Amino acid sequence: MGLIKFYKDNREFIKALESYGELVTIQQEVDWDLEMGAIVRRVCEKRAPAPYFKKIRDYPGFEALGAPLATYPRLAIAMGMDPKASVPEICDEYVRRTSGTPIAPILVDREKAPCKENILMGKDADLFKLPGPMVHDGDGGRYLATWHFIVAKDPDTGVINWGMYRQMVFDEKTMVGPVLPFSDMGKMFYGKYVPKNKPMPFATVIGCDPLSGVAACAPSPIPEDQFTGMLMGAPVELVKCETCDLEVPAHAEIIIEGEVIQNVWIEEAPFGEYTGYRTSPREPRTVYRIKAITYRNNPILTVSNMGVPTDEGQLLRSFSLGLEMRRLLESQGIPITGVFMLPESTHHLVVVGTKVAYSGIATQIANLIFGSKLSPWFHMVIVVDDETDIYNKDEVIHALATKCHPIRGIRKYEHSVGTPLYPFAEPEDRRWSRGAQVLFDCTFPLHWPKSDLPIKVSFNNVYPKEIQEKVLKNWKNYGFQD
């Protein structure tokens, strides 16, 4: 793998965003109570540059970065690419980097770890010393952790997990949030710690470098610290925690250490979700007890605001889930031309392009991905042929409306695993994570004679090559600007 440009911390990334015109620095003081969240939400909906808040009410010395990876140009910058890179180019580069050998992290001394510049232990470790925002009006509390990840370790294998699980501040020493049993951390906690009646050590990482954040969203089987190394092309630097046997990115802004408590629950939510709705009822959820807080001088909180598309959660989950599906299908020898999860679908809809090599290929594709560990996070699959550009929403909608037979082309999968966040689900189904899924087969049957196949009427399809080239060559001479 060649030399890759990467940013070792959030601060270098902020400078890069500014240099590309993807940052707005806000010098005016903003209120952590709704104002900051409202700005971030409007930024997401307008696809505006990331807001960098220099002054937060009640919290002198703290800053915040909102919507750090809410657009593809910002994701491209995080990958060290041109912000004008196309989605397929970003996807191909991601797959290229992560198809090699995992790169193990390196451990650095505390003296070389900026996240240790300030250490609060015992009674001094107070969550209200951090500027946790009230993100949405109607939320159940202040959510300090909205763009972050939690580090946990399997007690038997030593395998680590970095995952994004929301955390609401309950009091000075306690955070609360949902940990779903089918999630990687949920499997560790409910499968290993709870049966032994033992708490699980955790570390919440806020304000990491951008590629560590990308890795924490990826459903890859490779441990996220090694996966980050693959994305960087170099080892990520970690440092040991103060109170437990976990390691965290040395250049992160804020680290919160503690234990996930077994057999204790506190009510959490509601919260504005990635689906664009507030669906979570206020219910007893998993409890995090705090032991230590460490942070950099003038720490920069990272803030995401889940809601209508698109924000980080939708964009990165769509991006990484789609590419893991691509790996899965390619590993089974399926002749796919690409996989794309539309962020605007809140990563509930995935489009798969394929060469229709045999009958039933769309059903085979759906069976494979609905049967994978990725399955609970989406419920609609559209399979199109290789003439359809899966990254072009207009072409996908056209294929859906014209190639999918309203009865024979639709296959329903009942009794699937779902999540509590599906807005369309019955309250009882949400409570038990019950779902359903559907395939839309947008390919023409193989048994149709070629003479019966409808011909697509488009510029690229129904004009001779020489006419296309002549029109393109003279386009501006005709008076068109683009």
Image (cartoon, rainbow, N blue to C red):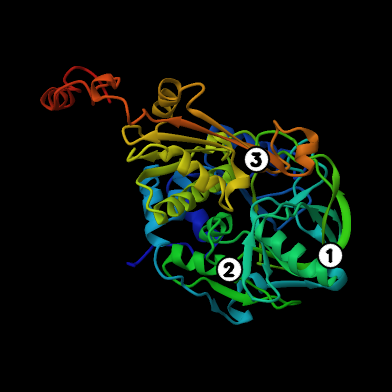
- In the figure, 245 relative to 82: above or below? below
Left or right? Give the position of 189 relative to 174. left
* Residue type marked 2: His
- Image quadrant in which you'd find residue 401: top left
| Residue to which mark 2 is pinned | 251
In this orientation, does residue 198 appear? Answer: no
Residue found at the very far left of the displayed protein: 466
Disc 3 residue type?
Tyr
Judge the density around disc 2: few (<14), some (14-19), many (≥20) Cα neighbours within 10 Å: many
**Amino acid identity at mark 1:** Ile
Q: Is residue 426 left or right of residue 447?
A: right
Give the residue number, with chain letter if any, for mark 1. Answer: 261
The residue pinned by badge 3 equals: 274
Quadrant containing the C terminus is: top left
**In the rendered image, which quarter is residue 271 located in?**
top right
Q: Position of residue 23 (x, y in %)?
A: 52, 45
Separation (CA) of disc 3 from disc 1: 26 Å
Mark 1 residue element: strand
